[in-house]
Amino acid sequence: MYKVLGNGLHVTVDDLAIGSGLNNTNSNPVRAEKVILRSDKHQRIDAVYYGDPSIGEWPDVEGNGLSLQRTKLTPAANNNGRFWIAALANPGFELNEAYYSQFSDEFNSLSLDNKWIWDNPTGDNDNYYSLSEVPGFLTINSYGPNDHFEDENSAPKIKEFAPIGNYTIITHLISNPDIAFEHAGIYIENSSASNWFKIIRDSNGDGVYVYNTINYETDGKYLHVPVSEIYLKLEKIDNQYSGYYSLDGSNWILVGCYYNNMKPAYMGMLVVSTPVENNFSSSFDYFRVRGIQ
């Protein structure tokens, strides 16, 4: 079984294959979210020294329960010099909270962690993110026209590679959408964005929506929740995706539940403006990922 190899995750690796993490020859590739090799320098992860990837060779290494051997590096296309690693772990290996916590972020730094990807499809300079505009929050600014619905995927997003297994994503959101179609929230999508699931605070109906998209066809459910400060939770259990909201971060109300057979590639936060020129910002207090056993 393929499992993720990551910072703080101590496993023994039987074999290793290099690829983009999404377009890999393995039947079930996974992303190594913290084990990153950069083409222009050495990288030290968990005290394991990986050598110089620029020459395309990787020596045998040992350290912290890792044994990586018989490896050559092949740069993946359009990956900004990163090599994403898929590893075969020993039977009995289990994911734990130390693993899932790597995907979380409290946004208390003034710089964005390098695990995050700023996805700005329109390239518009009016779209931006800030960690200082609201201290302790990640603020995403979205300038329309843009949207995120069915096959329309033009809104700015901050995303990371999704883990494997079952887990919840929770955020505390400050958002006040008041023009039609403005919304902000958290989402999971596959590599082509043909399948995705999200929970959002939306201007339409002044409430909270969950949307589930399969092959660019979308269905949704809604509850009227006219507040500007809210907690959102996205839960993944196998192929079942559920969205909840809370007013206090403790008592959760189900908005909707759907089945989706996608293979999650990315997860993150998005802010959608409107189909017309309009500026809309929302702020995320944190992005917390917790495993479900």
Image (spheres, helix red, strand yellow):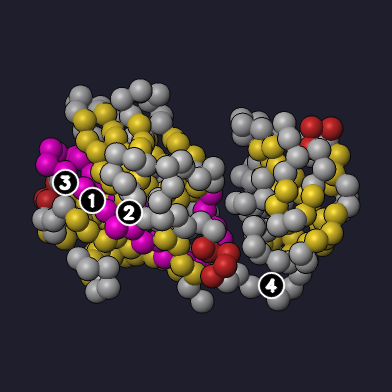
Amino acid type for the residue under numbered disc 1: Ile
Q: Give the range drawn in magenta.
A: 161-186
Image-based side of 132 in relation to 292, left or right: left
The residue carrying pointer 4 sits among few (fewer than 14), some (14 to 19) or many (20 or more) residues within 10 Å by Cα, namely: few
Image-based side of 280 in relation to 234, left or right: left
Q: Residue at x 28, y 44 (%)?
A: 134
- Label 3 sits on residue: 176
Residue 256 appears in view: no
Disc 1 + disc 2, Cβ < 8 Å: yes
Residue 171 part of the magenta-drawn span: yes
Q: What element carries label 3?
A: loop
Residue 156 appears in view: yes
Q: Residue 285 carries which label?
A: 2
Image-based side of 271 in relation to 195, left or right: left
Question: Where residue 231 appears, x then y in whole percent?
Answer: 26, 61
Question: Where residue 26 appears, x then y in whole percent?
Answer: 72, 51
Disc 3 + disc 4, Cβ < 8 Å: no
- Label 1 sits on residue: 174
- The disc, 3 or 4, on the residue closer to the chain's N-terminal end is 4
Question: Where residue 192 appears, x then y in whole percent?
Answer: 49, 40
- Label 4 sits on residue: 93
Amino acid type for the residue under numbered disc 4: Phe
Whole-number angstrom distance, CA of label 1 to CA of label 4? 38 Å
Q: Which residue is drawn at 57% across and 71% down?
A: 96
Disc 1 + disc 4, Cβ < 8 Å: no
The residue carrying pointer 3 sits among few (fewer than 14), some (14 to 19) or many (20 or more) residues within 10 Å by Cα, namely: many
- The disc, 1 or 2, on the residue closer to the chain's N-terminal end is 1
Amino acid type for the residue under numbered disc 2: Asp
Disc 3 + disc 1, Cβ < 8 Å: yes
Whole-number angstrom distance, CA of label 1 to CA of label 2? 8 Å
Whole-number angstrom distance, CA of label 4 to CA of label 2? 33 Å
Q: Residue at x 35, y 32 (%)?
A: 128
